[in-house]
Image (cartoon, rainbow, N blue to C red):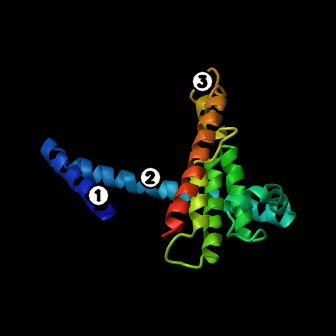
């Protein structure tokens, strides 16, 4: 299905460029997009390397284990199928911590590592486990106490009060996370009975 959508978008772009009499726009856009893709890939690789290294240091220092102990009751409630000492717990804790601090780019490598670890204990490798679905829901709609990235962007754009969005961001993300956890639980009950 997604291939058909992509094909339709490409064809409609080519047709519109031909209708407007500007076929050179297709080549320019393709090259610009390819350059942007390489740029973003390299940036993401650098960020992932840095934060995976930081995570390794935190693991060796015992910080991840200590943080995981604090969050263990919540993690057991949300992820009953994941053993408490499994490396996936540490990766999920670090991912959630980065999301809570508004560091979305920093959360990505931890999320990928968590999914990799969750897949290692997934009994049915060809489909996502309930823990993977729950983690994806929480990761997507995680509560944000301090949207540091948005504050930085607002400050760079010259906002008079870049931190004025903290309260509304907290309320919006809290509501989003509650809805995600609730939907995950309801859908798990519905599909778990089938």
Element marked by disc 3: loop
Task: Describe the element under mark 2 as helix, strand or loop.
Answer: helix
Q: Is residue 55 left or right of residue 132?
A: right
- Where does the image place residue 179, in percent across and percent down from the top left? 57, 46
Residue 13 x %, y %: 23, 50
* Residue positioned 83% across, 60% down in the render: 69
Instruction: Give the quarter of the image for residue 54.
Output: bottom right
Q: Residue at x 65, y 36 (%)?
A: 170
Identify the mark nearer the N-term, 1 or 2: 1
Dot label at residue 36 = 2
2 left or right, relative to 73? left
Circle 3: is it few (<14), some (14-19), or many (20+) Cα within 10 Å? few
Is label 2 or label 3 in front?
3
Residue where numbered disc 1 is placed: 5
Give the farthest residue toward the top: 160
Q: How many marks?
A: 3
Disc 1 is placed on an element classified as helix
What is the spatial separation of the Cα atoms under label 2 and label 3, in whole angstroms?
Answer: 28 Å
Q: In this view, does 158 lie above or below 178?
A: above
Residue hosting label 3:
159
Q: Is residue 15 found left or right of 174 in the rendered image? A: left
Instruction: Bin the neighbour count of mark 1 within 10 Å (Cα to Cα): few under 14, some 14-19, many 20 and up.
Output: few
């Amino acid at each position: 299905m997604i291939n058909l959508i992509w094909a339709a978008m490409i064809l409609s772009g080519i047709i519109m460029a031909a209708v407007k009499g500007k076929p050179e726009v297709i080549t320019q856009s393709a090259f610009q997009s390819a350059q942007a893709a390489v740029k973003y890939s390299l940036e993401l690789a650098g960020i992932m390397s840095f934060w995976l290294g930081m995570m390794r240091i935190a693991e060796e220092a015992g910080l991840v284990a200590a943080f995981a102990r604090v969050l263990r009751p919540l993690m057991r409630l949300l992820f009953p199928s994941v053993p408490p000492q499994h490396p996936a717990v540490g990766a999920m804790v670090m991912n959630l911590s980065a999301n809570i601090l508004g560091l979305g780019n920093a959360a990505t490598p931890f999320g990928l590592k968590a999914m990799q670890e969750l897949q290692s204990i997934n009994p049915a490798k060809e489909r996502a486990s309930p823990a993977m679905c729950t983690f994806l829901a929480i990761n997507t709609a995680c509560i944000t106490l301090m949207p540091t990235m948005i504050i930085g962007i607002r400050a760079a754009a010259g906002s008079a009060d870049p931190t004025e969005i903290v309260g509304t961001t907290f309320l919006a993300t809290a509501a989003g996370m509650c809805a995600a956890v609730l939907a995950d639980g309801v859908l798990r009950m519905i599909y778990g009975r089938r």
